[in-house]
Image: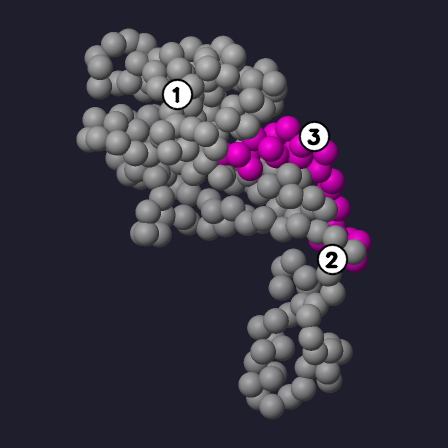
Amino acid sequence: SKVTGVPMIRLAIKAMLGKSITGAGYEGGLWKRQKLVAVKAPVFSMSKLSGVDNYLGPEMKSTGEVMGIDTDFSSAVAKALMASGMMLPERGSILLTIADRDKADAVPMIRQLAEAGYGLFATEGTAGMIHGLGIDAFAIPKAHTGDHPNTVDIVADGTVSAVVNTIEGDRESLEDGFEIRRAAVDQRIPCFTSLDTARAAVESLIGGAANYSIKPLPEYRDSG
């Protein structure tokens, strides 16, 4: 209803009461195609919940949602991420700790980040993959090694302004991942545990953050 302007719940109740939707000014069939894209994003309150992991599982952790609307996907994603506090800054550094299963799919995103001028920090395996692409990256030890500065240190001290952490591996890797994500929450910086979401965020940074439009909602509905 928010996207199309069609009061679906009100029409459904009228239909249940035996009234025709044509009497309310609507026809049957599919709604007209509109030149707009709507993206919803969850909003979390992890910073208020000490010790809670922000990795998403079956349990409900979001406390609300926001929606971005525009005429293309990147701009709509940019609006949704900005409203939820997850938009990547225009410049800065990012920590990448990518699971082996995701490394190949992460290559285009990594190239985009490098081309955008981002400083890349990565765990040993991810850094090796990035170096193999001919891209510079700082290799950072994991926290369980006891070395400093490590992955948690560079998040906690503000060296990086965002984190991409996809999960796999043994107990030590899982514990390191939790510490990284928790530090990101405490620093209130974007932390992505889904590669699909991270890629969409990077694409919105490249193509949508500077190009989105601002209009009243009815104008978007009428534009198509």
Q: Which mark is residue 34?
A: 2
The percent coordinates of residue 29 (x first, y second) are 69, 75
Answer whether residue 175 is magenta in the image.
no
Amino acid bearing label 2: Gln
Q: Is residue 91 above or below residue 83?
A: above
Residue range corresponding to the magenta coloring: 198-223
* Quadrant in the rendering for residue 18: bottom right
Q: Is residue 159 left or right of residue 180?
A: right
* Residue 160 appearing in the image: no
Pick the front one: 102 or 147: 102
Name the residue: 46% across, 44% down: 43
What sort of colour scheme is used for the picture? one colour
Amino acid bearing label 3: Ala
- Label 3 sits on a secondary structure element that is loop
Tell me which label, 3 or 2, sits earlier in the chain.
2
- Which residue position is annotated with label 3? 210
* Residue 25 appearing in the image: yes
Label 1 vs label 3: CA separation? 30 Å
Label 3 vs label 2: CA separation? 23 Å
Tell me which label, 2 or 1, sits earlier in the chain.
2
Q: Residue 126 carries which label?
A: 1
- Contact (Cβ within 8 Å) of mark 1 with mark 3: no
The percent coordinates of residue 26 (x first, y second) are 73, 77
- The residue furthest bottom is 18
- Label 2 sits on a secondary structure element that is loop
Label 2 vs label 1: CA separation? 41 Å
The percent coordinates of residue 84 (x first, y second) are 52, 40
Quadrant of the drawing holding the C terminus: bottom right
Q: Is residue 24 left or right of residue 2?
A: right
Name the mark nearer the viewer: 3 or 2. 2
